[in-house]
Every structure is written in structure tokens, then in C-alpha cells.
Image (tube, helix red, strand yellow):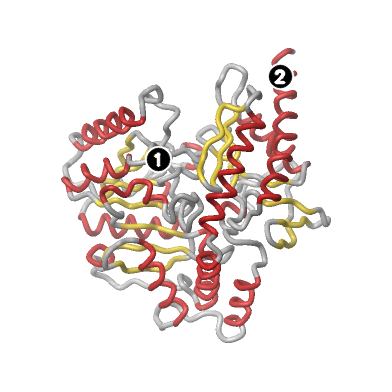
Amino acid sequence: MPDWLSVYYDEPLELSHGEGRYVWDADGRRYLDFFGGVLTTMTAHALPEVTEAVARQAGRILHTSTLYLDRHMVELAERIAALSGIPDARVFFTTSGTEANDTALLLATSFRRSNQILAMRNGYHGRSFSAVGVTGNSSWSPTSLSPLQTLYVHGGIRGRGPYPRLSDAEFIEACVADLEDMLGQTHGNVAALIAEPVQGVGGFTAPPDGLYAAFREVLDRHGILWISDEVQTGWGRTGDHFWGWQAHDASGPPDVLTFAKGIGNGMALGGVVARAEVMNCLDANSISTFGGSPVTAAAGLANLTYLLEHDLQGNARRVGGLLIERLRAITAGLSVVREVRGRGLMIGIELVEHDGSPSPRAASLALERAREQGLLVGKGGREGNTLRIAPPLSLTVAEAEEGAAALEEALRTVQNTVGAKERT
């Protein structure tokens, strides 16, 4: 394994199996899973509907590639196209969100005949060479080399940067002015804006609702495409909306939408949705060897069916709303906590030092203490100082309370430890 491979915890954790919202390690200890393998176990661990679909298909044929038709892939594409909100949509399946975003960039630059891309500061879009080239988070950008000319605009982080003291309306106005100014300095043929409606690796930060609708009005005047990176925000995780872009829908759906993670519930499945003229712009052959394979497409179809039939978006809204309020209540008196933010079951807890500066050490300590309490959470943010909470969307109220209690214990320990170090 390479030295740069990230592994959580001082004593790395081996997970052996899971069920529902719980996982077990190799020593038999049970943990409540509040991270879902980086927002990927979307419905539940070992969900019978998904595991049975995988087993049935695996017993027939494992692999064919997109050179051949597969009814699961076709049906899944039809359902995703209809759900996307994009008119006359076409769907191309990949194996990951990174590959989906890479494909979206290929489509946009080919369609617009330009390598200029607008991206959001603090954004993250994957680990391929092109995806790193549009990532605005230095912790996940190992090289400045890129085939793209990327221009970064304001707006992805509401509480930091040059505009945090403005009202939401003033914030949007200032970010739009920044976008207009940025476009005045380009060659004039920018291909696309790529943006996460809620920044995932960036610490679950988000702009005010409506920002990307305001951006879209500017983009449309210049013919610039809008790519909505829904790898983490899609499928109802935010509760209020099925897609993150719907919080910014005054100007209609995006031109291109990328998805992955939750749709496969652990299987390697991602993809791109785009209106037909954009998707069909490539003038050379292309296939996907593993994208939309019979097994992963069968899993995705079963998973999506379960999600819709059990209204897991509604559950994310209800249980997520209760969890956010509970977390805000238990952290109200803790100076180590700067903010509890998010919507649905996509929640961030930002930790700081006594002077208000970002505290990666507090986040790392909280991660360890939560594990000791039987809870797994994630970590992110521009400085690595934000806890990321994203459990399976079937989380129950009792499990939300269990997780909140574990986090309260962990954060109080962090508060006492950081405070002790300050006094010395």
C-alpha cells in the first residue's frame, strides 16, 4: 500500500460485516455507522433486497461490458433519466464518482471546444488527473499540473472567505459579481462550471439556496454548461430534495449531473446524466468496460427501488432534522464546536481551537473518542477540522439518539483535553 493512502484511526480498524446501520470489526465489536463508507452505504448494510439481487445476477453472468445490452442497465438508465429532471436525458454508467466527473469534463470541454473550467473554492471532485485539476481543496490536490485551465469562484462556503458577514441575498449578489468579474478575464469560451450543491470532502459546507440559480443566469448568457456534482448529495440525502441542485432550481436543472456512491449501496457504480446534445457530442468511439455491469446495475436498480418505495428521502428529512437539533443542543456550551451545519442526513460539526482557528487535532481526537463510544464518523473540511456525519438513510430515531449520545461524550472529552492543553 502507498504511504499516501489515508487510513482512519491510530489503530486501523478492520470491518468484517454489517447489518442495518451497524458494522462489526474483526474482534467482534459492534459500531453504529454514521459514515456509511463515505456516504456509500445509502440504504442499509446487508439490505436483503440488494444482496439477493446481486446473488441472483452473479449466478447468471458477472460481466458483459457496455458493448452488449443488459436489461438491468437499460432499466436503471431509464429510471435515473426520468428522476434527474434533465429534459431529453441520456445516461452513461461508470464505476465511480471520480470517473463520472472525468466523463462530465470530457463532455463539456468537447461540446464547448474549450479547456477552461469554472470550479468552486474548497470543492472536491475525485482523484483522477482531470478531477484533481478542478479540486479547490489543497488537502486533496497533490499536483498543480492539469490538462484544464481552472478558475475558482466564491460561493461554496457560507461562513468563511471574504463575505461571511453579508446577508444571504448580499452574499449571492457578491458571488455573482465575482463570477461576472472572473468571466471578464477569460478567453471568452469557458466550457462549464462544476459544483457540489453541498461540498462533501470540504466539510458539508453549502451556499444559501438559490446561489447556483443566480449563477445559471450568468452562465446561460455565455453558453457555459452547469455540471452538478451529486455524488454525495444525490438520492434524497439532504432530505429537502432528491438532488442537491433542486435547492437552486429557479433557473431549471443542470446541463450535466454526475452521481455515484449511494446508488450502488457499496457496489462500484456511478454515472453521468446529460441532455442529449451534450452527451452525444463525442465524435469517437467510447465504451465502459465495467460501468453498468450486470451485477452492479442489478444492485443499483434494487437499491433505488427500495429507497423510493420506503421514502428514505422523507426519513432523512425527519430523522436528520431531529439529529441536527439534538447535536446543536448538546454542543451549545462547548467552545470547541464552532458550528453544527447541514440538512437531512448530511451533517457537519466544525471544531476549533480556543482562539477560533480550525482544529484538526480536535477532529482527530473526536474521531478516536467516538470510536471508543462505539460510533464511526467521518472527517473533512478545508483544514481537516470537521466531523462528517452521513449514516444510511434508513436511520431510526432511536439510533439517532444513540449516536448523538456517543458524540456528546466524545466531544466533551475533546473539550476537556483541548482545554487542559490550553491551560498548560
The residue drawn where x is 71% and y is 51% is 32
The residue drawn where x is 49% and y is 75% is 293
> In the rendering, at what x and y percent does residue 221 appear?
16, 45
Residue beneath label 1, please?
144
Residue beneath label 2, please?
419
Picture quarter containing residue 336? Answer: top right
User: What's the distance in space between the residues labelled 2 and 1, CA to CA?
Assistant: 38 Å
The residue drawn where x is 30% and y is 73% is 285
Count every numbered label the image shows and give the total: 2
Q: Residues within 10 Å of mark 2 (few under 14, many from 20)?
A: some
Task: Tell me the mark number nearer the camera, choosing from 2 and 1.
Answer: 2
Q: Which quadrant, please, contains the C terminus?
A: top right
- Residue 320, above or below 297: above
Q: Which mark is residue 336?
A: none
The residue drawn where x is 29% and y is 44% is 213
Question: Could you tell me the amino acid type at mark 1?
Answer: Ser
Residue 93 placement, left or right of 409: left
> In the rendering, at what x and y percent does residue 164 appear?
40, 25
* Comes first in the chain, label 2 or label 1: 1
- Residue 382, above or below 94: above
The residue nearer to you, when weighing 222 against 291, is: 222
- Residue 69, above or below 181: below
> In the rendering, at what x and y percent does residue 351 appear?
60, 29
Q: Residue furthest bottom?
A: 60
